[in-house]
Image: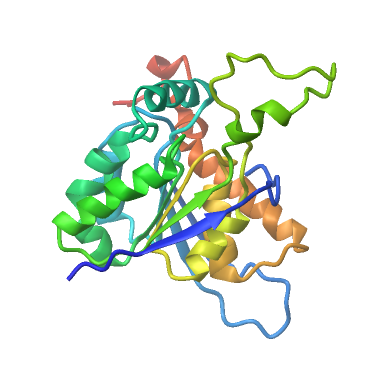
């Protein structure tokens, strides 16, 4: 039997701005004395942008021995597209490919392997994205706990928000206004047992930093560890780029094929 479970997290402000596909961390990564023996946490990133290759999910799911699988879809232009989609229909505004292409075909194996998923595919409509995921899980008769993190959408405060540089109100034709959320609500969702965490606009690296905080119990004042986790997040999220994806002289590399 499928159990519908949503954990709602509203982050009314960005907790941190630790601005941090496959990373392994074999250190304990904690400065506290008397910590357990070193353990391994494997995090894979299957998407660096909306339209990234669909082959990444099966490659990592079946070959990566992952603990966490994260997806980053959002950019400024993507948020604009999602805002327009939501304006046309309130049920839209999230990344449909995440639900239909990345999750639906593999939902049973994701559950069977115990891989936990974190994604900003919620875009302009995290609740809508979670509802669509719930339907996918229900159709597959899979029991999953889905956490939804909201609070990045500030359109409801548009009329009272003042531009700092000139003290004037925003123009009436503003279509979207979002803040970047951090890793704190993601780690809290995982702490409370979420199998899938859906968030809207967030710091790219928080998709990785959140699971690391959850796994290793880092505290808010362990700045070096948080910085290391943020760095890992940046490298994983931009894995294609940092491994040569934007190298223009690829044809000069021996045996590149």
Q: Which quarter of the rendered picture does the N terminus lie within? A: bottom left
* Residue at (45, 39) in percent of width and height: 72
Provide residue 93's location: percent of width, then percent of height. Answer: 39, 32
Residue furthest out toward the front: 159
* Residue at (25, 67) in percent of width and height: 143
Residue furthest out toward the bottom: 34
**Number of marks in the image?**
0
* Residue at (64, 82) in percent of width and height: 35
Q: Which quarter of the rendered picture does the C terminus lie within? A: top left
Instruction: Decide which of 237, 162 is in the foreground and name it.
Output: 162
Provide residue 140's location: percent of width, then percent of height. Answer: 15, 57
**Quarter of image, res 144:** bottom left
* Residue at (60, 63) in percent of width and height: 213
Instruction: Decide which of 224, 49 is in the foreground and name it.
Output: 49
Provide residue 50's location: percent of width, then percent of height. Answer: 38, 29
- Left or right: residue 23 versus residue 218 is left
Q: Can residue 136 be seen in this view?
A: yes
Q: Is residue 59 visible?
A: no
Provide residue 169's location: percent of width, then percent of height. Answer: 75, 19
- Left or right: residue 129 versus residue 159 is left
């Amino acid at each position: 039997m499928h159990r519908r479970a949503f954990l709602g997290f509203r982050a009314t402000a960005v907790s941190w701005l630790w601005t941090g596909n496959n990373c392994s961390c074999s250190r304990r990564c904690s400065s506290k004395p008397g910590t357990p023996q070193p353990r391994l946490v494997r995090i894979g990133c299957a998407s660096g942008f909306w339209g990234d290759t669909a082959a990444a999910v099966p490659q990592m799911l079946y070959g990566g021995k992952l603990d966490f699988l994260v997806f980053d879809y959002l950019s400024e232009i993507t948020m604009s597209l999602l805002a327009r989609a939501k304006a046309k229909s309130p049920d839209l505004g999230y990344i449909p490919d995440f639900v239909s292409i990345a999750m639906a075909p593999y939902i049973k194996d994701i559950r069977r392997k115990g891989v936990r998923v974190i994604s900003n595919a919620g875009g302009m409509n995290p609740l809508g994205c979670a509802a669509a995921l719930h339907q996918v899980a229900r159709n597959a008769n899979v029991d999953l706990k889905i956490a939804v993190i909201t609070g990045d959408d500030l359109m409801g405060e548009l009329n009272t928000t003042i531009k700092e540089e000139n003290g004037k109100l925003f123009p009436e034709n503003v279509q979207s206004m979002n803040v970047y959320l951090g890793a704190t609500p993601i780690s809290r969702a995982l702490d409370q047992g979420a199998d899938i965490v859906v968030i809207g606009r967030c710091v790219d690296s928080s998709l990785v930093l959140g699971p690391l905080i959850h796994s290793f119990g880092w505290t808010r004042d362990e700045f070096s560890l948080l910085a290391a986790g943020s760095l890992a997040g940046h490298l994983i999220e931009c894995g294609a780029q940092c491994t040569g994806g934007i190298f223009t002289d690829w044809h000069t590399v021996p045996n590149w094929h």
